[in-house]
Amino acid sequence: MLCCLCIAASSANEHPPAGNNEPLTQAQLADIQALYTQPASTEALSALAQQLNLQLDTRGQFVQLRHLQVLKKPLLSQGQFIFSPTQGLVWQQQRPFKTLMVLKDQQLIQQNSQGKIQHFSAEANGNPIAQQLPRLLQAIMAGDIDALSAGFNLFMPATQSVIQPVIQPATKPENRSWQLGLQAKDPQVQSSMGNITLSGDTLIRSLIMTSNQADISDYTQIQFTLTQQGPLSETELALFSLGNESAK
């Protein structure tokens, strides 16, 4: 189930084009480490919850990069995603090869590049990490601050401006960026997932997974682009039915 959050990071074997997707600088990595010394205040979390607009069906594209010190260039995977608060999550990788993953109802359905479909049930898995991850992932994608607070210790920069609940007419809410650090309360989950740093505006734009060790030079970064919100089409809804026939 961890692969559903760190989507296909280990299977991506294509390198990005030269000049694109530059790695984080040492200063940026240091800022991420410093974030986890700054617990989020109730006021800041309340303001963030009011700013986020994640209750609508959302689709877009993703680029995932896994940076490893032993490699000169990061590993790349990219594709499309769909998130629906009622249906679940679709993660459709297009490069370096096609795969499809659907997370819904505490189940992960995965279709590999050969078309083989596998079902994984969190409830049937005795591993506590596998049982918790679907709920945690749902909370992350939905920006559900209350649910995140139940499963994670939350961190926000002390210098981050508190977002006012009432937006003045001349102020564009999408210009108000934020950063939120997630550190799982369950030691086993934390050991497997490391720290998760989210950033965005009214939507989540970036997710960075780092270890909780002193050296975080190895990390995974996911960028969400071309994001649109609105009702799902019939084609998009059909993706959530992956594996229904084989499960009967």
Image (spheres, rainbow, N blue to C red):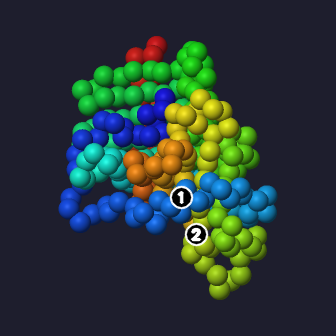
Q: Relative to the observer, which residue lies in front, 145 or 247?
A: 145
Tell me if 241 is positioned left or right of 123 in this view. Answer: left
Q: Secondary structure at mark 1?
A: helix
Identify the residue at the far bottom of this view: 170
Image location of residue 98, percent across then percent down = 27, 38
How many residues crowd around disc 2 within 10 Å: few (fewer than 14), some, or many (20 or more)?
some
The residue located at (68%, 83%) in the rendering is: 169
Residue 130: name its quadrant: top right
The residue located at (21%, 59%) in the rendering is: 17
Report the amino acid beneath label 2: Ser
The residue located at (62%, 44%) in the rendering is: 183
Image location of residue 53, percent across then percent down = 62, 59
The residue at which mark 1 appears reads as: 32
Tell me if 88 is positioned left or right of 80 in this view. Answer: right
Report the amino acid beneath label 1: Ile
Identify the residue at the far right of this view: 42
Q: Secondary structure at mark 2?
A: loop
Check the image and report above or below for 90 versus 26.
above
Q: Relative to the observer, which residue lies in front, 246 or 128?
A: 128
Marks 2,1: beta carbons within 8 A: no
Q: Which mark is residue 177?
A: 2
Measured Cα–Cα span from mark 2 to mark 1: 15 Å
Query: Of tags 2 and 1, which is closer to the observer?
Result: 1
Check the image and report above or below for 208 versus 235.
below
Q: Which mark is residue 77?
A: none
The residue located at (23%, 66%) in the rendering is: 19
Image location of residue 237, percent across then percent down = 47, 40
Tell me if 211 is positioned left or right of 123 in this view. Answer: left
